[in-house]
Amino acid sequence: MNPVALLTPTYGRDLEICTLLCESVDRHVTSFSRHYLLVPDCDLPLFAPLASERRIIIPASAFLPDWLRPLPRMIQRKRRQFWWSLRAKPVNGWHVQQILKIAATISLPYERFCILDSDIVFFRDFDLSRFQYPNTIPLLKMADAVTADQPRHSRWLETSHQLIGLPTPPFPAPDFIGHIIFWDKQTTRALAKRIEAVTGMSWIEALCRTREFSEYLLYGFFVENDESAALRHSDVPKTPCVSYWDDPTLSKDELTRLLLRANRDDVAFSIASFSGTPVTTIREVVAESDAILASSAATRLSELAASC
């Protein structure tokens, strides 16, 4: 059996929350091979203390072509770093993180990958042995979740189909974007080859020229439309992660209520870093998570007993 590897593209501004992710992985996640942190070259010293026997810090340049280079940090827009080339308009760090997920999955010596964003925190044990190759892996597919009134998703839906040579489906369409996402190496290689066959250029150049794309929509729709890839996956309507995608900062009480939404299959939560929720607040709730969840379970049992 070929164990699963963990992938986390990250950067300096997410160091504190990524540190919490790593601590929670070490505490709760088992049966994986390596945890790779993919970081901009200039951030390598910041992340070096997180390296361990099973955690490897890799510079972005290891996976990017020579023609795509980072601009100096002082040249930023909305505090985002950009990469430039003579082949396309500059792309920002969010685009590069998506490219790194694909490139690392193709290049690293494992068949299965679990992609973890920096802002994920595990609060329960998560055994990855059942996702090892050649077992099937879950493909998050939320039916009818992309609608015409979602401008960014609508655009990503269009570009994803253009890149893999398919007609854009009507609305509502499925969504494949979430947390704790599993990818397969053979599928990712086939996806890259499809993009190159359709666009007539390298897949990285095609993505840089497109700029508005979603790696998860690309992967999901490719699997849906490729018979061999579909056999390696099993559709699931949700992932085992409670996600908060909104802007407002969460208080400790609000974060506790979010944790209480977890069902017994959830193993992690994710608070979008742009919400500005302090990592100290997240740490406090994580430290109390066992008691919070135990209290919630006891309440549910009491309610069930009362209803009988």
Image (cartoon, rainbow, N blue to C red):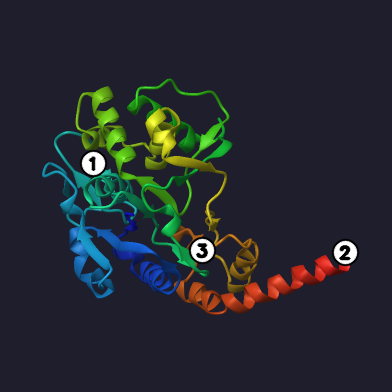
Residue located at (34% from left, 57% from top): 3
- Left/right of residue 239 with respect to residue 29 in the rendered view: right
Residue located at (47% from left, 76% from top): 280
Q: Are marks 2 and 1 in contact (CB under 8 Å)?
A: no
Residue that label 1 marks: 90
User: Tag 3: Cα neighbours inside 10 Å, few (<14), some, or many (≥20)?
Assistant: many
* On screen, residue 147 above or below 96: above
* On screen, residue 250 above or below 85: below
Quadrant of residue 18 within the rendered picture:
bottom left
Front-most of residues 232 and 216: 232
Mark carried by residue 268: 3
Q: Position of residue 115 (x, y in %)?
A: 38, 54
Residue that label 2 marks: 307
Question: Judging from the image, what secondary structure is the residue with disc 2 in?
Answer: helix
Quadrant of residue 31 within the rendered picture:
bottom left
Q: Position of residue 117 (x, y in %)?
A: 40, 57
Question: Judging from the image, what secondary structure is the residue with disc 3 in?
Answer: strand
